[in-house]
Image (cartoon, grey):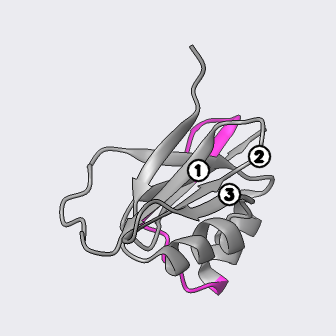
Amino acid sequence: MKFCWVTLSVDNMEQSLAFYRDLLGLNICSRFSAGEVVEIAMLGESDKPKIELMCNKHNKITNRGTGISIGFEVNSLEEAMAYVQSNHIPITKGPFSPSPMTRFFFVNDPNGIEIQLVENK
């Protein structure tokens, strides 16, 4: 079995793309309509697991899952913190260092999904 993607239901595709593509640097592998009201964008590297953004223009999600976060590795935690703050994205938790080799903090994407940015030494 091979992990393929995780699907995130988003309220606004353009805001979500601005976060995942422009802020986190994920490539758009594909973007298409799935019917008249659903738009899908697959983000990531072509040969690796992806983030699927799915926007249904008629359904707004009011209860997203809790206790779930998506982690992205960064080269420098200090640079990542400065970068998100300069883009007016508040740090919601952290930074934390559970071991000398790992440090991380959390932000929320435009839909309230928790994103963990982690530095591994």
Residue 25 is inside the magenta segment:
no
Horizontally, residue 110 falls left or right of residue 62, namely right
Q: CA distance from mark 1 to mark 2?
A: 23 Å
- Label ID, residue 30: 3
The range drawn in magenta is 86-104
Q: Return the x and y of residue 103 as percentages of the image width and height.
A: 63, 46
Q: Residue tagged by mark 2? A: 45
Earlier sequence position, callout 1 versus callout 2: 2
Closer to the eye: label 3 or 1: 3
Q: Quadrant of residue 21?
A: bottom right
Q: Which mark is residue 84?
A: none
Q: Is residue 7 left or right of residue 49?
A: left
Q: Amino acid at mark 1?
A: Phe
Q: How many marks?
A: 3
The N terminus - image quarter:
top right
Q: Secondary structure at mark 3?
A: strand
Locate residue 7 relative to residue 62 in the image: left or right.
Answer: right
The residue where tag 1 is placed is: 104
Q: Nearer the viewer, residue 62 or 85?
A: 62
Q: Is residue 3 above or below residue 109?
A: above
User: Does the rendering let one see residue 96?
Assistant: no
Amino acid under disc 2: Glu
At 54% across and 80% down in the image, what residue appears?
Answer: 14
* Left or right of residue 103, residue 37 in this image: left
